[in-house]
Image (cartoon, rainbow, N blue to C red):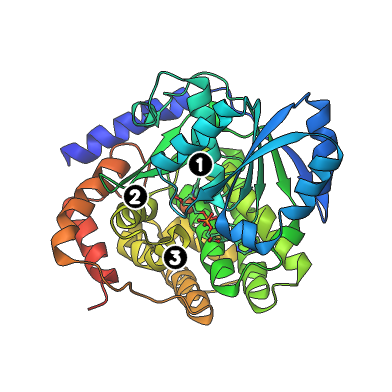
């Protein structure tokens, strides 16, 4: 009870403080082949040497090659950092930051999913604060200084990191995963080119898409909405319900791919301001220990957490249900039917209801971390206690 009162007061103060932050959105380049507009934009910005942050999968896919050729033709110098891994680490940020300095870069381009984007944000934070470690920038408003030009080219449709103020990084030694949150981390330019997501395999399409749905729903059911974040979350939910199954079935459906990119962006606009919630707190603690892919963890957790919220979310979930044409006689029924539809969508995309290898002895530590991440910061519909977190970890544990 005391814990809830403290959290709600804290959240109220934060809600007022959020209005004073220097919010901005990236300049968007959208549509098929929009990535090829980048060299001209880079020239206009006077870029002399780019650090391109990407990963092995991207290099193997060949998706980056045409842009590299174009940069070469336009005589824009670049250095490549290709070692980002899913759930990017602080060590990878430091390695890329060293390259940035060695090559005397002046701008950053992230090419890939949320992992390369967050790694590039981490590098940018270090460039802005050469004497501050990533660990010291953990939490809210610790970056403070402007980053060099940061361009993001998302190749998954899920994280929304191309528009958010967050960089989520992991420490493999301490097995922690945490966020840096500062408007300075909002990218300057984002490219939403659906052709880049065309060959994203079905499983990654599904799990990253469910991450976008989680952002939209968690921000919508939270207590820190604005008219804009509500509108964006509603639109994102509608788009995911319509286009994620299509993108999953046929990756080459470019209309579905475009709308999923847009859904992910809109969900990013919603949660960067209105926060995520307990699904993310539980999922970050899980990924920190087991390196579980972020989208998969969220997809599995989402229906469990929504069910556990019970009456605290019925009204909001019923509103979302109406938007996606899900019926029910009462708000409670509509909410339950929406959760059922999420479970069915997961099933249709081969996403399990539980996760293997969760060790009983790790649960207390994960609870502690999830609790620390969510409380008092996240304006969730119900402040979870130790008991609530415990129930969720147990519910997703596949024996
Ligand atoms: N900063 C934020 O606001 C924010 C929000 C949500 C999640 N995140 C973080 O983002 C990370 C997850 O990012 P993600 O889900 O986009 O996945 P990811 O970046 O980790 O990529 C997963 C895999 O997909 C491959 N891949 C990416 N695009 C591809 C494509 N078009 N074709 C084929 N393969 C492709 C990658 O090579 C990689 O192997 C997590 O660390 C998570 O915590 C950040
Ligand atoms: Fe997420």
Identified at 78% across, 25% down, the residue is 45
**Where is mark 3, residue-wise?**
296
Q: Earlier in the sequence, mark 1 or mark 3?
A: 1
Identified at 44% across, 30% down, the residue is 15
Q: Quadrant of the C terminus?
A: bottom left
Viewer-nearest residue: 336 or 112: 112
**Residue 197 visible in the picture:** yes
Identified at 43% across, 24% down, the residue is 141
Kindly state the secondary structure of the residue where label 1 is placed.
helix
Q: Is residue 10 above or below residue 264?
A: above
Q: Is residue 393 above or below residue 120?
A: below
- CA gap between label 1 and label 3 equals 20 Å
**Where is mark 1, residue-wise?**
119
Q: Is residue 306 above or below residue 75?
A: below
- CA gap between label 2 and label 3 equals 14 Å
- CA gap between label 1 and label 2 equals 20 Å
Q: Is residue 132 above or below residue 357?
A: above
Is 188 on the left or on the right of 359, as rendered? right
- Depth-wise, is mark 1 or mark 3 nearer the camera? 1
Q: Quadrant of the N terminus?
A: top left
Coordinates of residue 161 in the picture (x, y in percent): 56, 44
Residue labelled 1 has its Cβ within 8 Å of some atom of ligand 1: no
Find residue 281 and name its label: 2
Coordinates of residue 133 in the picture (x, y in percent): 38, 26
Coordinates of residue 147 in the picture (x, y in percent): 58, 24
Coordinates of residue 86 in the picture (x, y in percent): 47, 55
Kindly state the secondary structure of the residue where label 2 is placed.
helix
Viewer-nearest residue: 51 or 19: 51
Viewer-nearest residue: 334 or 353: 353
Total numbered badges shown on the rendered structure: 3
Question: Label 2 neighbourhood size at 10 Å, few (<14), some (14-19), many (20+)?
Answer: many
């Amino acid at each position: 009870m005391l814990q809830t009162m403290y959290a709600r007061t804290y959240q109220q103060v934060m809600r007022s403080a959020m209005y004073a932050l220097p919010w901005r959105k990236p300049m968007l380049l959208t549509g098929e082949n929009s990535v090829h507009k980048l060299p001209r934009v880079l020239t206009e910005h006077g870029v002399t040497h780019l650090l391109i942050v990407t990963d092995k999968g991207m290099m193997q896919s060949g998706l980056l090659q045409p842009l590299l050729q174009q940069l070469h033709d336009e005589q824009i110098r670049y250095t490549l950092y290709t070692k980002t891994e899913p759930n990017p680490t602080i060590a990878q940020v430091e390695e890329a930051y060293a390259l940035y300095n060695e090559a005397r870069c002046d701008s950053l381009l992230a090419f890939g999913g949320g992992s390369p984007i967050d790694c590039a944000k981490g590098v940018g934070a270090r460039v802005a604060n050469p004497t501050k470690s990533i660990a010291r920038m953990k939490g809210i408003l610790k970056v403070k200084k402007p980053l060099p030009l940061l361009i993001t080219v998302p190749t998954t449709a899920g994280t929304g990191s191309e528009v958010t103020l967050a960089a989520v990084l992991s420490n493999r030694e301490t097995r922690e995963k945490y966020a840096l949150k500062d408007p300075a981390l909002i990218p300057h330019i984002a490219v939403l080119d659906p052709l880049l997501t065309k060959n994203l395999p079905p499983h990654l399409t599904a799990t990253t898409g469910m991450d976008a749905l989680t952002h939209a729903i968690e921000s919508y059911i939270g207590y820190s909405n604005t008219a804009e974040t509500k509108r964006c979350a509603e639109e994102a939910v509608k788009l995911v319900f319509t286009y994620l199954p299509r993108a999953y079935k046929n990756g080459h459906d470019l209309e579905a791919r475009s709308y999923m990119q847009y859904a992910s962006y809109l969900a990013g606009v919603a949660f960067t301001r209105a926060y995520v919630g307990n699904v993310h707190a539980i999922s970050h603690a899980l990924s920190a220990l087991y390196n579980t892919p972020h989208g998969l963890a969220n997809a599995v957790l989402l229906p469990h957490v929504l069910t556990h919220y019970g009456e605290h979310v019925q009204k909001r979930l019923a509103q979302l249900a109406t938007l996606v044409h899900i019926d029910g006689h009462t708000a409670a029924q509509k909410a339950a039917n929406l959760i059922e539809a999420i479970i069915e969508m997961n099933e249709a995309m081969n996403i399990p209801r539980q996760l293997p290898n969760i060790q009983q002895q790790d649960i207390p530590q994960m609870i502690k971390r999830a609790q620390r991440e969510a409380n008092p910061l996240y304006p969730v519909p119900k402040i979870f206690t130790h008991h609530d977190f415990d129930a969720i970890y147990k519910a997703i544990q596949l024996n």
